[in-house]
């Protein structure tokens, strides 16, 4: 009896107990909603299907038995090597798995690695050419979006993956927010480019742009720095000095005011005494 | 999750929605043994080793990619005028036209900006073929060496020129060669340090002048001494009327 009751409470507890998310622990509680939005776009959203063909329908009929089964697209797990952050791979990554080359043989471990090439991409907003490591898919996406800037601005962070692309996107957004200062020498072109890309600015506020493209560690250090700057400890030395100066000033004022009043109003015989005056005056 | 993605893409992509288009890139794989179904709204079960056995469906790095349409934003020599739409292989279009800034993507805004009318017939070019300019450039840079006998008497004929062109890897029919106005006879060693030009008519339309030099050939002791880089040296014109034209022809350096 008692044991069953304990089990029931444990079950209830397990239902009510909620694990703390990373935004509810320590300094991360001070992260602004702008960063939470970026985090959601970067880590929570599921990236587009690159290495498999997702089934579009919701249900599927088994050909043999005629049984209706739900379609559950379970993505192929990808490996993200550190080199991915030095290039723009367009959503591709390394796949670790096995090949079954012969039905009678044991499976063979295999890595499917994308073909990387170094080429130049042209950013109109930044007014520069960049030499980056890309895949064929990146170039195809750039061509499909009619330009590198359009590709970066239109693609969510979960599909860009690499830090290089995210930092470039942030820089492009900052540049756009400031009205393309790199084209100051040609106001007509500056206006053209701003008008072409200004639609993207509508989905971000200045604060969101400030917090865009930061890693977890960078965001935390930014929060820590902001906190430190906000409540900077003032040395007691300067507090006391200030207090003292104020006190002295107040005292000085008092002493300035009081003798004048005293002399005019007092009737004491001492004040009337003038030791340097003539004898008959005193 | 997919609903979230859709909402986000709608806010981000105001233009044509490109995220939902089908993508077939690099290694497209398929599980040989798909994982079991999970409960509705539940957690997918832990993947076993057999769920990591993949079959290759497609490798798009070897499939042919469709052509890319671009609009020239300036006159490009031998390619087209401003506003011409080109349909090229994507690598060539990207590397040779889009990156140097000679062309822009043929998106609706640019089509409107450059006022491209694709139905309009293309202006017939003044050249008989798109490769004429290239051929003319090659021929005008050529120094044609005409090898003639030092011992046997000869008169310069069109077939001599044709054979010399063939030696220089140019197939030129005899009817396309217009000889110089004077007859040249030899052997005459004073011709060795002289030059003249013949005119080649391409497709019976374009004319190009080719610099020619006669070299006297013999074997044994009669052979003329070897001269270093003789094609780089400027020579005197054989026919005084041709001197001004020869001066304008480029010499290889």
Image (cartoon, coloured by chain):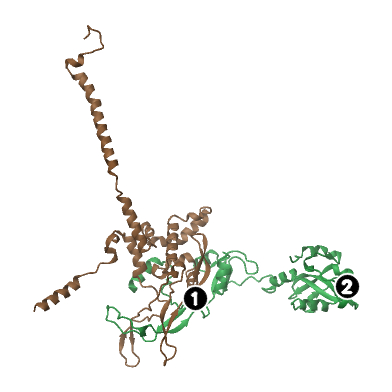
The residue identified by callout 1 is A115
The answer to which of B14 and A267 lies nearer the viewer is A267
Asked whether residue B206 is in view, the answer is yes
Instruction: Kindly give the residue lying farthest to the left in the view shown.
Output: A1
Instruction: Kindly give the residue lying farthest to the top in the view shown.
Output: A280
Disc 2 is attached to a residue of which chain? Answer: B
The answer to which of A252 and B137 lies nearer the viewer is A252
Shade representing chain B: green
Residue sitting at 23 percent across and 28 percent down? A254
Q: Which mark is nearer the camera, 1 or 2?
A: 1
Instruction: Kindly give the residue lying farthest to the front in the view shown.
Output: A237
Question: In screen coordinates, is B107 left or right of B226?
Answer: left
Same chain for mark 1 and mark 2? The answer is no
Question: In screen coordinates, is B231 left or right of A184?
Answer: right
Q: Is mark 1 on a helix, strand or loop?
A: loop
The residue identified by callout 2 is B184
Residue sitting at 42 percent across and 78 percent down? A95
**As drawn, B194 above or below A262:** below
**As drawn, A178 above or below A107:** above
Question: In x, y percent, where is residue B182?
Answer: 88, 71
Shade representing chain A: brown
């Amino acid at each position: 009896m008692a044991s069953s009751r304990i089990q029931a409470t444990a079950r209830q507890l397990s239902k009510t107990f909620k694990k703390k998310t990373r935004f509810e622990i320590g300094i991360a509680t001070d992260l602004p909603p702008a960063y939470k939005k970026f985090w959601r776009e970067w880590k929570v959203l599921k990236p587009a299907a690159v290495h498999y063909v997702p089934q579009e329908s919701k249900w599927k009929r088994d050909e043999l038995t005629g049984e209706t089964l739900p379609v559950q697209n379970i993505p192929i797990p990808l490996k993200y090597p550190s080199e991915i952050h030095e290039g723009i791979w367009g959503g591709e990554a390394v796949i670790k798995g096995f090949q079954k080359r012969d039905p009678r043989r044991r499976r063979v471990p295999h890595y499917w690695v994308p073909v990387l090439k170094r080429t130049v991409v042209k950013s109109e907003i930044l007014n520069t050419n960049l030499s980056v490591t890309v895949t064929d898919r990146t170039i195809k996406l750039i061509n499909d979006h009619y330009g590198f800037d359009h590709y970066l601005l239109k693609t969510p962070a979960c599909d860009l993956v690499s830090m290089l692309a995210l930092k470039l996107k942030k820089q492009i957004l900052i540049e756009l927010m400031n009205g393309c200062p790199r084209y100051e020498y040609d106001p007509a072109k500056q206006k053209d480019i701003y008008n072409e890309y200004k639609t993207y600015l509508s989905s971000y506020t200045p604060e969101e742009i400030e917090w865009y493209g930061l890693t977890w560690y960078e965001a935390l250090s930014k929060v820590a720095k902001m906190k430190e700057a906000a409540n900077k400890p003032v040395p007691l030395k300067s507090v006391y000095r200030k207090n003292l100066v104020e006190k002295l000033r107040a005292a000085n004022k008092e002493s300035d005011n009081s003798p004048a009043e005293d002399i005019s109003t007092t009737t004491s015989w001492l004040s009337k005494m003038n030791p340097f005056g003539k004898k008959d005056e005193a | 999750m997919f609903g979230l993605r859709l909402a986000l893409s709608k806010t981000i992509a105001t233009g044509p929605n490109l995220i939902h288009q089908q993508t077939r890139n690099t290694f497209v794989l398929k599980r040989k043994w798909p994982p079991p179904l999970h409960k509705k709204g539940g957690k997918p079960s832990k993947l076993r080793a057999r769920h990591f056995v993949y079959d290759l469906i497609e490798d798009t790095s070897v499939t042919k990619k469709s052509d890319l349409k671009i609009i020239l934003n300036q006159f490009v020599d031998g390619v087209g005028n401003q506003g011409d739409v080109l349909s090229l292989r994507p690598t060539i279009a990207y590397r040779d036209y889009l990156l140097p800034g000679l062309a822009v993507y043929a998106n609706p805004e640019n089509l409107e900006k450059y006022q491209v009318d694709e139905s309009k017939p293309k202006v017939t070019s003044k050249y008989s073929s798109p490769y004429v300019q290239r051929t003319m450039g090659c021929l005008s840079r050529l120094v044609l060496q005409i090898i003639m006998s030092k011992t046997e008497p000869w008169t310069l004929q069109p077939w001599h020129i044709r054979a010399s062109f063939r030696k220089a890897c140019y197939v030129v029919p005899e009817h396309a060669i217009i000889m110089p106005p004077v007859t040249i006879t030899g052997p005459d060693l004073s011709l060795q340090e002289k030059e003249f030009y013949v005119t080649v008519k391409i497709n019976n339309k374009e004319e190009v002048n080719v610099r020619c030099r006669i070299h006297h050939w013999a074997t044994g002791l009669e052979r003329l001494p070897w001269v270093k880089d003789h094609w780089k040296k400027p020579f005197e014109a054989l026919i005084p009327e041709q001197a001004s034209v020869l001066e304008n022809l480029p010499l290889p350096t």
